[in-house]
Image: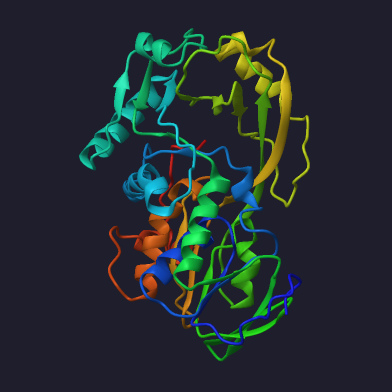
Amino acid sequence: MNETGRELPRHASVVIIGGGCMGVSIAYALAAAGTQDVVLVDKGPLGSGSTSKAAGGVRAQFSDRVNIELGARSLETFETFTRRFGQEIDLHKAGYLFLLDSPEAVAEFEKNVAVQNDLGVPSRMVSVREAARLSPLIDTDGLLAGAYSPADGHCTPESVVLGYAGAARRHGARLLPNCAATGIELDGDRIVAVHTEGGRIETGTVVCAAGAWSRTVGAWAGVDLPVEPLRRQVLLTEPIPGLPPTTFTIDFGTTFYFHREGQGLLLGMSDPEETPGFKLDRSDAWLPRLGEAMARRAPALMETGIATGWAGLYEVTPDHNALIGVARNVDRFLYATGFSGHGFLMSPAVGEVVRDLYLDRTPFTDVSGFDAGRFAHAGSRPELNIV
C-alpha cells in the first residue's frame, strides 16, 4: 500500500510519473481514449510541484511554430474547460501584451506575429499609444511598439489539475498522490516495472511528466533528458484601490511582468544571476533588479505593498524548448518535460500529443523537432518568447 492506505495496483498498461497539470492531462487523454489500467504516481499531492507555483498565464504568442500550435490548441481547451470538465478555472481573457523597446525586438515580433496570424492566432502589433491604453499602469518612455493578442489571458492552475484529475478518474485512471516513484526496472532495453515507495507496479510503458525532476527519472531508464531546475519567484501585491483593468503585461527587454490577481497584482521577473538547483526558498537577491525594472516601466507600483510571494521551479532545456517524444534506446519510454515555464499553458495540447504517440497515431502537430536527442546533432530550435 502507499502512505494514503490505498492498495497499489500490481499492473498497469502505462505508468505516468508526475502529477502536475502535464501528468493529469496525459492521464485524462489516455483514459478518455479507452486505454485501460492507466496509473499516475506523484511524490506529493497532485499539482503541488511547479504547477501550484505557476503564474497561470495562457497564451499562443510564441516564436516557434509548434509552440504556437500547442498554445493555441490549449487555449481552445481552457475556453471550454468548465463546460467539459465541470470545474471552474477562473479564466480571464485579458490578453497578453509584450512591450518592445528595441528595433531588433520589434522586427522579431513582427515576424512572430505573421507566423501566429498564419496559424489563426489573432495577435497584432500595436502602437505605443494603444499599449498604454491596454496597460494603463505602464510608463511608455523608450517604448517603440507592442505585440498583443486578445485571446490570451490567465487562469488558476490548481483548478485545471482538479478538473483533469476528476475526469481521468471517471474514465478509469488510477491517480496515486503521495506515492513517489523510486526507479524503473528494465529487462535489456524493455521496461518491465516501476518501483514506488508503495511497491512495484508491473508495466511495459512509462511516461515521464516529472518537470524539473525529469532528468533523474530519465536516468532510471538510461534516457538523457537535459532538464535543469531553475528557481523563479513570484510576488503578490496588497489590494490596490482603483486598480484599472489591465492586460497581462510583459516588458520584453527586462522580462518584468504583471497581471491582475483579485484586487491586486501578481508580478515577477527572471533573474539572470539565478543558478540551477532545487531551490524553493525565497531570496531577496533579485529584488533590486525587479525594483529597477518596475521603476522604469511601471513606477506607479513602487509604493504598492507586497502581501506575499513564493518560489517555484522552471524546468529548463538548453534551447528553452520542450522535450516531447519517445525514447530511441528504451522500448516504450515517453516523455513530456522541459517546457521552461510554459508546461501549464501547453498541458492540454501536450496531453493529446502524448496520447497519440502512445497509440501510434499522428498528432495534430509535428513534435519530432522536440526529440530529446536533438542536442547531440546540433538540432536545437530556440524559443525566443520566454518570460
- Can you tell which quarter of the image residue 348 is in? bottom left
Q: Is residue 234 above or below residue 28?
A: above
Q: How are the colours assigned in the image?
A: rainbow
Name the residue nearer the viewer: 340 or 76: 76
Q: Position of residue 312 (x, y in %)?
A: 67, 44
Q: Position of residue 327 (x, y in %)?
A: 47, 74
Residue 195 can be seen in this image: yes
Left or right for 230, reference 31: right
Q: Position of residue 374 (x, y in %)?
A: 44, 62
Q: Position of residue 122 (x, y in %)?
A: 27, 32
Q: Is residue 112 above or below residue 344?
A: above
Report the quarter where the N terminus lies: bottom right
Name the residue nearer the viewer: 25 or 68: 25
Q: Is residue 46 above or below residue 302?
A: below
Left or right for 284, reference 267: right
Q: Residue at x 71, y 37 (%)?
A: 310
Q: Is residue 131 above or below residue 369?
A: above
Q: In the rendered picture of this protein, how many numbered marks are placed on residues?
A: 0
Q: Residue at x 50, y 72 (%)?
A: 173
Q: Residue at x 33, y 49 (%)?
A: 73
Name the residue nearer the viewer: 228 or 92: 92
Q: Residue at x 49, y 80 (%)?
A: 37
> Outermost residue, bottom direction?
187
- Can you tell which quarter of the image residue 18 is in? bottom right
Residue 314 can be seen in this image: no
Name the residue nearer the viewer: 237 or 286: 237
- Can you tell which quarter of the image residue 380 is in? bottom left
